[in-house]
Image (tube, rainbow, N blue to C red):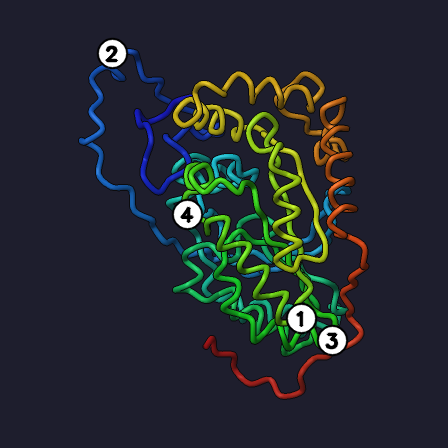
Amino acid sequence: MSREFRKDIKGRGASSNFSNRYDSLTYEPTEEDFDNYQEEEKPLLRTEILKDSSRTIISQNKSPDIGFTYSINSYRGCEHGCSYCYARPSHEYLGHSPGLDFESKIYVKEEGPQLLREALMKPSWKGDVIMMSGITDCYQPLERKMQLTRGCLQVLAEFKNPASLITKNALITRDLDIFTDMAKYDGILIYISVTSLNADLAAKLEPRTSRPEARLKAIETLAAAGIPVGVNVAPCIPGLTDHEMPMILKRAKEAGAKFAGYTPLRLPSTVLPIFSEWLEVHEPLKKDKVLNAVKDIRGGRLNDPNFGSRMRGEGARADHLEQMFEIYCRKWSLNKEEFHLSSASFKRPTNQLSFDID
């Protein structure tokens, strides 16, 4: 894999731009290149905002082991910069690297709310549940400025169309007013992802996300407002963060979480070399331990692409993770209540005025 000669880059998860696997020409740096490279020669990597000209916004999922059918993503690429992000390879289809490009070249669907309105107005749409953040985080840093997620939520609330969200960013509490309205007709369900409670580790692993305590505070704020909210221990990284699962579940419960989920680390295609490089840069003494632990839950491989097992893993170590999750969910009384999203209130508005984002 060709890559730029970079090490730890402040505010970024990847350390280099691995070549796009679809490029016909690549350059492989030599040892002399690395010896001659000076970090100070590199300018600060700033985020570039690009326009996504897609004319549709609702995507349909056909993977049998993912628990939603429809999703919307107002952003492609994600500034959060999580080194393990399974969505990184999607940037290759846009002609970019899954490395630094993924977290610094962000495509935005500026007309996302209007495109969503048009989709919900179609007679064929029946008010099905829509997942937000099916690929990239809908509350990544750009959302503070762009407000595309808020605009889409306003459309969903207007139509009383149910939605579920998952995020690592405490910015989600900004939209409490919309969630409160949607909760009245069982129209909202929220997961906050917590990978680690170690703030220093989280800062390296997920550089532009909210820190762990801020995420727990977000759970507390949402729960206090009566919003169904849970915690997602994801990804659970064997050999690095898996030991934290019991305490994450406990702290989330204390904050007000009602339900929980978890997903072991997945390293599909070009995510593997990016995460492996992250280990080299940030946790070199744990690299072999972590990768061997991943193999333990992936049938001796570093990635399992098979439906079903890819989301839970297999083998003794994967069984242990599942048992630990179930034991501590019972201990902390998580997943005891069932929460259902309802399309019963879905209704197209009769007044089709133009839509404006607050």
User: Looking at numbered disc 2 in the image, what kind of residue is underneath it?
Assistant: Glu
Disc 4 to disc 3, how far (Cα)? 33 Å
In contact (CB < 8 Å): disc 3 and disc 2? no
Check whether the beta carbons of the residues at disc 1 and disc 2 lie within 8 A of each other.
Answer: no
Labels 1 and 2: the sequence-earlier one: 2
Q: Secondary structure at mark 1?
A: loop
Find numbered disc 2 in the image and state the secondary structure of the residue it sits on.
Answer: helix
Q: Are marks 1 and 3 in contact (CB under 8 Å)?
A: no
Residue nearest the observer in this picture, 179 or 85:
179
Residue denoted by label 1: 226
**Residue 201 seen:** yes
Task: Please give the residue where the numbered disc 3 appears in the rendered image.
Answer: 185
Asked if residue 191 is positioned above or below residue 113 in the image, the reply reads: above
Which residue is rendered at x = 52% and y = 62% of the image?
Answer: 172
| Position of residue 311 in the picture relative to residue 272 (left or right) | right
Q: Nearer the viewer, mark 3 or mark 2?
A: 3
Q: Position of residue 208 (x, y in %)?
A: 41, 47
Label 3 amino acid?
Answer: Tyr
Q: Position of residue 310 (x, y in %)?
A: 70, 32
Distance of mark 4 from mark 2, alpha carbons? 33 Å
Characterize the local packing of mark 3: few (<14), some (14-19) or many (20 or more) Cα atoms within 10 angstroms: some
Mark 3 secondary-structure assignment: loop
Disc 4 or 1, which lies upstream in sequence? 4
Q: Quadrant of the C terminus?
A: bottom left
| Residue 32, numbered circle | 2
Disc 4: which residue:
208
Q: Nearer the viewer, mark 4 or mark 1?
A: 1
